[in-house]
Every structure is written in structure tokens, then in C-alpha cells.
Image: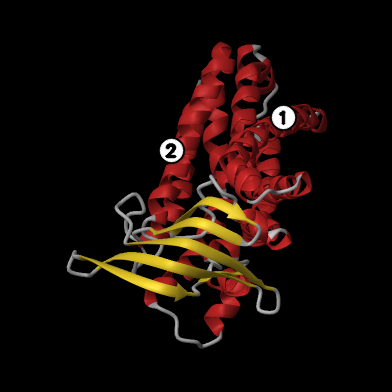
Amino acid sequence: MLRLMDRYIGKQIISATIFGVVLLSVMLVMGNLFKELRPLLVEDKASPMQVGQFVLSFLPFSLIYTIPWGFLVAVLLVFGRLSAENELVSMRMSGLSLLRISMPVFVIAALLSALCLWLNISMAPKAKDTMKFVLYEAVKENPNAMLDPGVVQTRFKGQKIFIEGRNGNILNGLHIYHLNEENETDFPSRSIYAREAKLKIIDESKQIRLNLTDATIDSQNPDGTRELAFIGEWEPLLFDFTADRKKRRKPSTMTNDEIRARLATGEEIEVSKRYNLNNEIHRRYAFSCACLALALVAVPLGINARRKETSTGLAISIAVGLGYFLFFMIASEFQKKEGNTAILLFWLPNVVCLALGISLFFRARRK
């Protein structure tokens, strides 16, 4: 009888979780794809295969969010229906405690937490790294497509480029705007205009350079004054594929083994970067416990939802999920700062869910 009940509840939780994860993943992937669709198709002239690669690369990263949220919705809906149709009352009248009835939920939650741990420490960082640089792969395959006339190029970090016209590798009316590092929407820190520029693609060093003719440079001095300079000919570096990839590597795109290896190298690392690397490891372990933490809260909340489980369960899942993820967003603001503030905020949602779940379980047992 117990095995039959476990299978009955477990199948419903698993099927509802799969449906929720698939639905949320599609929404999250499509939303991020539309965000990157313009750079992929307009600026980089990416092929459909590269767009597909981008989607597949983003999927493991999205699962670390959609699995806990989909599981939360599934538990609320299933236990809300069991309560509404009095099946839960029948189980408890047969002598089973609420904790024993909920055991399949916690077993599934533990398995999903193990899956999320694997995704967080290994797959998601690799996927994020691949997703970030699939755009650069499109540029490597067709570098000439990245500087089309009439298109504002935003692919280059810290600068925007606009070309009035083009004839082969000759660019006419080149505008380069170097954005302010502190506020990219502020007035550009430096703007360059060249009547003519020649695009030079150096395959050996994997670099793209511009040979500017009759260039005008308007730069801002540290005291706020602006300085105008004229240069007859200049050849600045526009893009370096190899160096750019190395310097853009962030902790979020490194696996836990790579982070530990970097910390153990003994090289001089800035204090903020060292805290960022250490806190990233704690963030992943804490976030991997989301399914277990949310399960403790979702079971009693789902029972209390009763006959309004469809609308109430969805509303509760959104509120609980947003509250849980909000702690991690706040903690991310302290990730690069000294001290243990970020670590405490990363683990605080799990502690709160544990305390709240135990309290709600005791109340639900008395009903």
C-alpha cells in the first residue's frame, strides 16, 4: 500500500515538474534568444546552425532556475489537488503522518538538488562560456560581416561603431564611440571619426585592425575638459579574438575545479576578485539546495490552497520563488566585497525555508 501511494504521488510530482520545467525553459530560452536575436542575425550574420547552438548552450544554464521553480509549482498543484479532493484526508485516516505522505516529494527534491548541483558546478558554467562566445565564433567565420554600413555595432565591449558606407574593405564615414565605463548611457569618453578606413583582417594573429585616414579624435580629459586632435593616418586594434576571450573569462563561466585551480596557483589576485571567486562557489552550493528548501515550504502551502489550487498555487509559487531568488540577487551585489556578507545571504534563503517549512508542517499536522 505504501509503495502504491509513493508511486501515485511520485508520478504526479514528476509529470507536473517535467511539464513546468519544459514550459519555463522554453519561455526563458525564447526570451533570451529574442534579446540576442539582433546581434546574432543583424550584426554577426549568424547562420541558423549557430542560432541553434546558442539555444542549446543556454538550455543547461536555464535549467538551474527552471528546475526549482517547476518543482515548486508541481508540489503546490499536486498537494493542492490531493487536499481539495480529500485524498489527503483518506491517507491520514489510514494512520499515515503528513511527513510520511510527503516522503516521495523529499526523495525527488533530493535527486533534483543533486542534478542542480551538477549543473551549477560544471555544466552551467561551461554552457554560459559557450553561449557567450558562440557570437565570437560567428565573427571568426565571417569577419567582414561585422561592419556593415547603416548598422550600429554593439558587439565590441565599451564602444559602438557606425559606418556610413562601404566598398569592399574600404569603410567610408567611420564613427567610433568609446563609452563611459561607469555609465555607458553617458556622453562618450572619446569619439573618433575617419573619412576613410581600411579593414585589415590578420589571420595569423587573429586580429582585426583599422587603417584610418584623416581621423578626428574628440576625447575627454580627467578634469572634464575635452580635447580635439587630428591624425593623418592611424592603425588601431579593433578586435583580438584570443586576448579578448582570455580577459573576458569571468567566475560565472568557470567550473568549480577551474576556480579552485586558479586560487591555488599562487598568482597575485586582487582582493575583490578573490572574494568573487570564493563566493561564487558558495553561491552554487547554496542555490543547488533550492529544490529541498522549497519542498519544505511547498507541501504545507499546497495543502492550504485547497480547491483554488490552480490559481492560488501559481500565485504562491511566483511569490515564494521571487522571494527565494531575490536573496541571491541581493547577495550578488556583495559578491566582490570583503567579508562574509555574500555567503550569509546566499545561505539565508535555505535557512528561512527550513524554519518556515518546519513551522508550517506542525500547523498542517493539527488540521
Left or right: 237 with respect to 29?
A: left
Q: Give the vertical position of 161 relative to 32 (above or below).
A: below
- Specify the amino acid type for callout 2: Gly
Which residue is the site of mark 1?
19
Left or right: 305 with respect to 129?
A: left
Residue 85: horizontal and vertical position, in percent? 66, 11
Mark 2 vs mark 1: which is more N-terminal?
1
Task: Give the number of marks.
Answer: 2
Whether residue 131 can be seen here? no
Residue 23: horizontal and vertical position, in percent? 67, 30
Give the quarter of the figure containing the N terminus: top right
Residue 78: horizontal and vertical position, in percent? 66, 24
Q: Give the vertical position of 234 relative to 167 (above or below).
A: below
Residue at the spot x=22%, y=70% of the render?
A: 222
Tell me, for residue 74, which label it has, or none. none
How far apart are the two marked residues, 2 and 1, measured between alpha carbons? 23 Å
Tell me, for residue 323, which label it has, or none. 2
Residue lying at the far bottom of the rendered structure: 266
Mark 2, secondary structure of its residue: helix
The picture quadrant where one finds residue 175 is: bottom left
Left or right: 302 with respect to 96?
A: left
Rendered image coloring scheme: secondary structure
Q: Are marks 2 and 1 in contact (CB under 8 Å)?
A: no
Mark 1, secondary structure of its residue: helix
- Specify the amino acid type for callout 1: Phe
Given residues 68 and 104, the one toward you in this image is 68
